[in-house]
Image (cartoon, grey):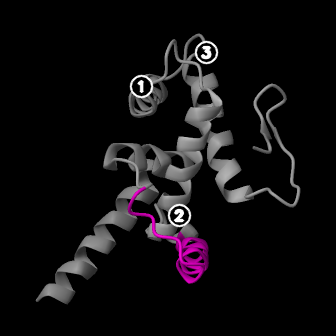
Amino acid sequence: MSFDKDTSTITLDEHSDFLVDSGVFFIHMLRKMALAENAPTRLLKDWRIVESWLSCKDGNITSIEENKIGKGWKAYLAIGVAPSFKLQEVFDVYSKQYKDSGYSFKDDRPPTEVMEVFDRLLATDKEITVKKNHDWAEEKKRKD
């Protein structure tokens, strides 16, 4: 793992997967902010969702949980559904890259509520709502 939780840095080397490590970084930052004094309720709620998914003991994230986060984050990107229009092109690129490499996200896909937390780490509630409403409308058109 090239993410150092003590210094909150990601070190890139030949074995690094920056995308996976960035997901681990985001979850460590979520935990840190959610457990801070006067943290917004929404952050604490999001952390509790992730904490439950990870089955963290005492709220500490171990290397085993970091591995699970990394796999879940990779699957989240591989699915290719971005939380906002601004990010969709990037998600398309990573989704294609992972699929072209033969990666299947099915075994690593986190629960929906965890992926919704991931969405909120990358986009505002308004951006997420606008994108979801658009995606649902497009899906409905395809079915009609």
Circle 2 is placed at which residue position?
Answer: 77
Circle 1 is placed at which residue position?
Answer: 48
Q: Residue at x 80, y 45 (%)?
A: 2
Categorize mark 3 by other alpha carbons within 10 Å: few (<14), some (14-19), many (20+). Answer: few
Question: Whole-Å distance between the Cαs marked 2 and 1?
Answer: 22 Å
Q: Residue at x 73, y 58 (%)?
A: 17
Q: Amino acid at mark 1?
A: Arg
Magenta-drawn segment: 88-107
* Pointer 2 or 3: first along the chain: 3
Secondary structure of residue under mark 3: loop
Q: Residue at x 55, y 81 (%)?
A: 96
Q: Nearer the viewer, mark 3 or mark 1?
A: 1
Magenta-drawn stretch contains 141: no
x%, y% of residue 47?
A: 47, 28
**Quarter that holds the C terminus:** bottom left
Secondary structure of residue under mark 2: helix
x%, y% of residue 40?
A: 49, 23
